[in-house]
Image (cartoon, rainbow, N blue to C red):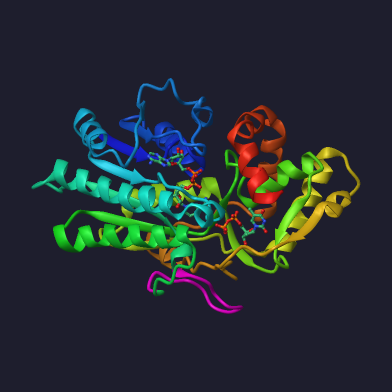
């Protein structure tokens, strides 16, 4: 029996990781620690929350006593750390909350793990989930590899870069067994509609403007979230201690091309004429410090651990659009209240 703490398990990627571990490893106890911020939602896990190997703990990763208490109460011997503030636009408005959660929260967890496991790191693991945004921005050519120098530009990526450095420092200084992965942009079910794909699906459905930053020429590498969860599973079980693995979709899209593809799929599902919703495209002021291009070289993960994405983008987008259209109540619940205020301040 292994007792695994997953932080941020009520969020977008975390909920997919929790579901995969609870279903695939009935002999593991999965403890999901989450503060349930605006981005966390227990609805994301309602299909597995009565499983005997699943426990939810509502706590803040910045609360040292609560974290230590969770470690000792559930005899934690592995952690997959996903809890974070995750949206670049919010980090531009409020960088402090990103430093607090992403930097101090991660440090808190590292210190708690080190102190609870002190003297016996055998069969223990601190797995830190991070982003490719720590590497900065690419021009038209090249890819991020695991040895690319860090060059973060947004408060979000700066806070994630800082947390990655702390995780490595605990390996180098104290011998804490760690592994890190840096992943490209994810998409799929349960993503909060502040990120590009779910925001635009929702706006197309509601005939609202689609705010494209700048000229829509920025490039992102998109990965289906369930493929990310599978990569995390592989790295958790087979990753080399102290190592970093890049995870990517080998799937680069210019924003405007992705948006037009998305419009086509949503229009088809809604029975609208093909491309009818292109009229909703509205070019708006560019994001400050907007990174031009992200692209991941995930060959290390493929060559060493045998992982590669399983889903083609066209199939992933179809599944994602279908999910949002079939789960209008979920969207309605998460976009009521606070979201309206955020949306007004951000876009109106
Ligand atoms: P998300 O915003 O959807 O979810 C974050 C979760 O963390 C929420 O459930 C929230 O309640 C929880 N949380 C926030 N602050 C907390 C705190 N102080 N204590 C406890 N829980 C707290 O994020 P996501 O998109 O699922 O990203 C998860 C992780 O993956 C993050 O670390 C992010 O940096 C990383 N990542 C995300 C992407 C992406 O495309 N979304 C890509 C690469 C890496
Ligand atoms: P986002 O989903 O916020 O992810 P990230 O900034 O972490 O890559 O944005 C993806 C791309 O879409 C990014 O280049 C910014 C752009 N974008 C828009 O053009 N309009 C929007 O309203 C949003 C949220 C993003």
Residue ID at (64%, 52%): 196
Q: Position of residue 298 (x, y in %)?
A: 47, 65
Q: Residue at x 45, y 55 (%)?
A: 95
Q: Where the N terminus falls, by quadrant?
A: top left
Q: Residue furthest left?
A: 119
Given residues 104 and 301, the one toward you in this image is 104
- In this rendering, is residue 132 above or below 80? below
Picture quarter containing residue 5?
A: top left
| Left or right of 286, for residue 264 | right
Q: Position of residue 230 (x, y in %)?
A: 46, 47
Q: Residue at x 74, y 62 (%)?
A: 257
Q: How many marks?
A: 0
Q: On the rendered structure, is 27 left or right of 88?
A: left
Q: Position of residue 14 (x, y in %)?
A: 45, 41
Q: Is residue 96 visible?
A: yes
Q: Is residue 143 magenta?
A: yes
Horizontally, is 123 left or right of 106 in the view? left
Chief secondary structure of the magenta portion: loop
Which of the 4 image quadrants contains residue 338?
Answer: top right
Q: Is residue 198 visible?
A: no
Give above or below for 244 relative to 235. Answer: below
**Magenta part of the chain:** 135-147
Foreground residue among 7 and 338: 338
Relative vertical location of residue 285 with respect to residue 66 in this rendering, above or below: below
């Amino acid at each position: 029996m292994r007792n695994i703490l997953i932080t941020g398990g009520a969020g977008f990627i975390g909920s997919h990781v929790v579901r995969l571990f609870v279903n695939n490893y009935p002999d593991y106890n999965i403890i999901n620690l989450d503060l349930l911020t605006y981005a966390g939602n227990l609805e994301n896990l309602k299909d597995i929350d009565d499983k005997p190997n699943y426990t939810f703990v509502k706590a803040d990763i910045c609360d040292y006593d609560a974290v230590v208490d969770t470690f000792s109460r559930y005899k934690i011997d592995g952690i997959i750390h996903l809890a974070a503030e995750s949206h670049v636009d919010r980090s531009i408005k409020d960088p402090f909350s990103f430093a607090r959660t992403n930097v101090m929260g991660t440090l808190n967890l590292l210190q708690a793990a080190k102190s609870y496991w002190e003297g016996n790191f055998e069969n223990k693991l601190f797995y830190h989930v991070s982003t490719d945004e720590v590497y900065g921005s690419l021009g038209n050519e090249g890819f991020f590899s695991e040895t690319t120098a860090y060059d973060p530009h947004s408060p979000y990526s700066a806070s994630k870069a800082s947390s990655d450095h702390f995780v490595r420092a605990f390996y180098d200084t104290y011998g804490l067994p760690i592994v890190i992965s840096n992943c490209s942009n994810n998409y799929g079910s349960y993503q909060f509609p502040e990120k590009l794909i779910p925001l635009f699906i929702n706006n197309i459905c509601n005939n609202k403007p689609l705010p494209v930053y700048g000229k829509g020429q920025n490039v992102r590498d998109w990965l289906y979230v369930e493929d990310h969860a599978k990569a995390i599973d592989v790295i958790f079980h087979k990753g080399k201690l102290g190592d970093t693995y890049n995870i990517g979709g080998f799937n680069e899209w210019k924003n405007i091309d992705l948006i037009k593809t998305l419009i086509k799929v949503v229009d088809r599902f809604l029975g609208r004429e093909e491309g009818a919703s292109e009229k909703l495209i509205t070019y708006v002021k560019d994001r400050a410090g907007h990174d031009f291009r992200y692209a991941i070289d995930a060959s290390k993960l493929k060559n060493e651990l045998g992982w590669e994405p399983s889903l083609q983008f066209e199939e992933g987008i179809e599944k994602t659009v279908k999910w949002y259209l079939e789960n209008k109540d979920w969207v309605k619940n998460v976009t009521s209240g606070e979201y309206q205020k955020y949306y007004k301040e951000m876009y109106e």
